[in-house]
Image (spheres, helix red, strand yellow):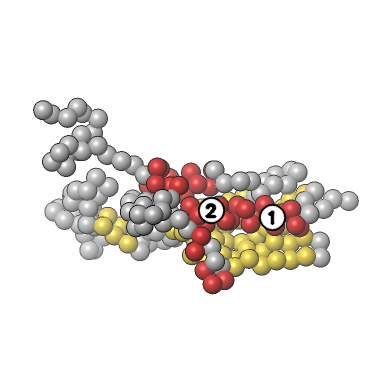
């Protein structure tokens, strides 16, 4: 007879990033670098769902310019000035059926995975159930325990640096603030 444990639930997260593409890239990269939650046949699955719509905006694009590829107040392309619309929130769905794993082993691996995620990506809410033979644990973000683990980026706290900062795109500029885009600086 085999031992089985199960994980099912959701985690609401908000990665850092200036554009939707950058946020998605950072979230995917963080997930690829987290420790595994394992079973003898397969590991935990994580599915990423970007919430519908947008909940933030910027008056400039990722290069710092107000261009005609931004969206106006009515959702159409703007001829002069518009907004870069962004959805900050993603839902992570976690699930797994782990053969030859005892409850305590799975709980320990998942806690390590979740704590590492919380340091790098802001966690808003958690509702995950871990079940084993005659044992069940419901993990929630009670008192924002996981939200408090988030390591602030250096631009919001000079005494901190988030692991994800090195993943953010950087653009070389000349002394006047113009993008160099791989071109040598004019002298």
Give residue 117's mark.
Answer: 2
Looking at the image, is 187 positioned above or below residue 18?
above
Q: Image check: 5 left or right of 28?
A: right
Quarter containing the C terminus? top left
Observer-nearest residue: 12 or 85?
A: 12
Where residue 40 appears, as percent x and y from the top left, is: 75, 43
Q: Nearer the viewer, residue 94 or 140?
A: 140
User: What percent of the width, then of the height, locates residue 154?
Assistant: 36, 52
Can the viewer see residue 28?
Answer: no
- Left/right placement of residue 10 relative to residue 62 reads right
Residue at the (26%, 60%) spot, across then down: 75
**Label 2 neighbourhood size at 10 Å, few (<14), some (14-19), many (20+)?**
many
The residue positioned 37% from the left and 44% from the top of the image is 168
Q: Which residue, given by chain and number where applicable, does mark 1 sit on?
A: 108
The image quarter in which residue 137 lies: bottom right
Side of 158 relative to 185 (left or right): right
Tell me where residue 55 sits by quadrant.
bottom left
Residue at the spot 16% in from the left edge and 42% down from the top edge: 177
- The mark that comes first in sequence, 1 or 2, is 1
In-image side of 89 versus 10 (left or right): left
Can you name the residue that lies furthest to the bottom here?
143
Counting every numbered tag in the picture gives: 2
Expressed as whole percent of the image width and height from the top left, the position of residue 106 reads: 71, 54
Residue 125: give x, y in percent of width and height.
52, 66
- Badge 2 element: helix
Residue furthest left in the image: 187
Q: What number is the disc on residue 92?
A: none
């Amino acid at each position: 007879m085999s031992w089985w444990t199960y994980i099912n639930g959701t985690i609401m997260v908000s990665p850092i990033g200036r554009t939707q593409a950058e946020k998605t890239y950072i979230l995917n990269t963080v997930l690829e670098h987290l420790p595994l939650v394992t079973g003898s046949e397969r590991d935990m699955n994580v599915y990423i769902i970007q919430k519908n719509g947008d909940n933030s905006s910027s008056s400039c694009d990722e290069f710092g310019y107000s261009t005609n590829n931004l969206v106006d107040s009515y959702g159409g392309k703007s001829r002069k000035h518009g907004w870069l619309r962004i959805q900050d929130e993603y839902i992570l769905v976690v699930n797994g059926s782990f053969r030859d794993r005892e409850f305590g082993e799975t709980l320990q691996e998942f806690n390590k995975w979740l704590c590492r995620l919380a340091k790098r990506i802001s966690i808003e809410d958690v509702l995950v159930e871990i079940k084993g033979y005659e044992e069940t644990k419901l993990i929630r973000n009670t008192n924002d325990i996981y939200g408090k683990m988030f390591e602030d980026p250096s631009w919001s706290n000079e005494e901190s640096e988030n692991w994800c900062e090195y993943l953010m795109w950087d653009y070389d500029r000349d002394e006047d603030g113009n993008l160099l885009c791989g071109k040598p600086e004019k002298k």
